[in-house]
Amino acid sequence: MLLAATFFISVLLIGGFYLLKRIKTLAYNYVYMSKLPGPPPDGIFIGNMSYLQTSPENLFVRLREAMKNFYPIYKLYACHKIGANILSPEDCELIMSNPAHNTKAQLYDLLHNWLNDGLLTSNGLKWQTRRKILTPAFHFNILQDFVQIFNEESQELVNIFKKECKKSYVNVTPHVTQFTLKTIAETAMGSKLNFKTQEDNDYKQAVYDVGKILLYRLVHPWFVLKFFNFFSPWYLQERKLTNILHDFTKQVIKEREENFDHDALPQEQHDVYLGKRRMAMLDLLLSAKHKDGIIDNEGIQEEVDTFMFEGHDTTAAALSFALMLLACHKESQNLILQEMAEVLGDLHKKPSQNDLQSMRYLERCLKESLRLYPSVFFIARALGEDMKTFSGYLLPKDTIVIMHIYDIHHNPDIYPDPEKFDPDRFLPENSQNRHPYAYLPFSAGARNCIGQKFAILELKAAVCAILANFVLEPVDTPETITLIADIILRTKEPIKIKLIPRSN
Ligand code: HEM
């Protein structure tokens, strides 16, 4: 009896202690965060909920207005969660360059049902170990082998466009999405998709549909939590879509594992990319499982899900926007063709990695396109320690910081006439005085995009193949499209352009 009473009192005391500590932290955070400017809240608990709960296109516009009203920082809050919205390169540098702030914010829990704890969403030692395993999969020598696949898939995209170009316009977004999905599956997973099967098409549609549900959960913050998500109107639909996504990647892994050559495992880590045996990403993961035992089946599944998503959706958005901008700027199309003629001689010659790398004007066009339309338009972290912003606000440890890449890229003080497409902004002489954190399409610091070189080479190969075969003419323009807030930057409707076969 005495023992039970002592146990009960101890539990009560410890529980009470933690509760008080939590209340103290919340109060401390609230005091500091309340000093930040921001849109007026609707009430003490509901905070800015009504500000957030609007259509995806209105939300996108509202967030842009907040940049104008509250630069360089503002707060938004809902329930007991307060987010500090960061709009200046200086504050991004303070966060991204400090390893203490490498932890992804709770917002990324939204992705857990689908991506579990893959590279994008994991933290701490798990993230470090995985990043170390996966970095060689994107080494220069491996990318060299991938360029052939980029060229083959670009040619297939051109073949589709050749059939479609008889129409008065082409909806490019679904076609380029298929292109980037096939490319990541074949390069990183060694799996060739043909989109003739129901599973391939269901996967593509499920990625799109799940994004809508994730956004719904994001603006209804209680549904971010797994427990409350159970009561969301979309819970069953999310489960169904997640099953489609997982069944698809399980099949990709199964097929690769069946054909995996255990005898050809590299002896040393550096053998992986020094030309002795080059390994695609999935092979590296299988090797880490069979040879070193540092990853299990669940670990492989979460990385394959992560890379299939991150490796195609972002690049498809980037290519769709780049094609629209090039269609609107015939002079840029001509300059790219001129550069292709200089580097390749024959416009229809398939470019090598060196060829693609030496196309500097094309690179500037893609950089400018990613400035105007950064596929990942915001990223979020949880502060690992207190931080003083450049403008003097104190943000307490654990604060959710949301860095708005889109707004930094459209700041007229950094990019004069920011809506203008001007690839020469990225000439060395025009960028040397720009803040190093003023251009962040691939984020920066230790948690930057592992696939950025892959993405740029893939985009260059696709643009070269398309321009060698077609003149692009505008149907959609920056003025006609409607941008929406989603898990990545998307347009409300697919982007339309006109493709005129090139006569050469
Ligand atoms: C134009 C295309 C792309 C853009 C704009 C882009 C952008 C980004 C950004 C901004 C991040 C940081 C995300 C965050 O902190 O929340 C990121 C991370 C990541 N990206 Fe990309 N990405 C692109 C293409 C790719 C490709 C092709 C791959 C794979 C082949 C890839 C794989 C990843 C992964 C795995 C991460 C997480 C890295 C980590 O936390 O260590 N991305 N990307």
Image (cartoon, helix red, strand yellow):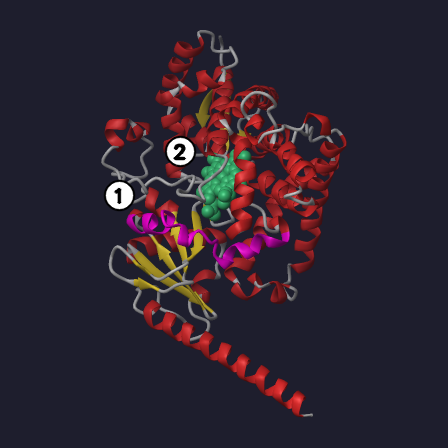
Taking depth in this image into account, of 447 and 332 the one nearest to the observer is: 447
- Residue pictured at 59% horizontal, 24% vertical: 278
- Alpha-carbon neighbours of circle 2 within 10 Å: few (<14), some, or many (≥20)? many
Q: Is mark 1 within 8 Å of ligand 1?
A: no
3D distance between C-alphas at marks 2 and 1: 16 Å
Element class at badge 1: loop
Element class at badge 2: helix
Q: Quick one: label 2 or label 1, which is nearer the N terminus?
A: 2
Taking depth in this image into account, of 486 and 172 the one nearest to the observer is: 486
Q: Is residue 250 left or right of residue 220?
A: right
What residue is disc 1 on? Answer: 412
What residue is disc 2 on? Answer: 369
Q: Which residues are magenta?
A: 90-113
- Residue pictured at 72% horizontal, 26% vertical: 263
Three-letter amino acid code at the position of disc 2: Ser
- Residue pictured at 67% horizontal, 50% vertical: 242
Please state the horizontal and vertical placement of residue 395, each as a whole percent of the image: 34, 63
Please state the horizontal and vertical placement of residue 174, each as a whole percent of the image: 58, 34
In the rendered structure, find residue 139 and report the number of the disc placed on it: none
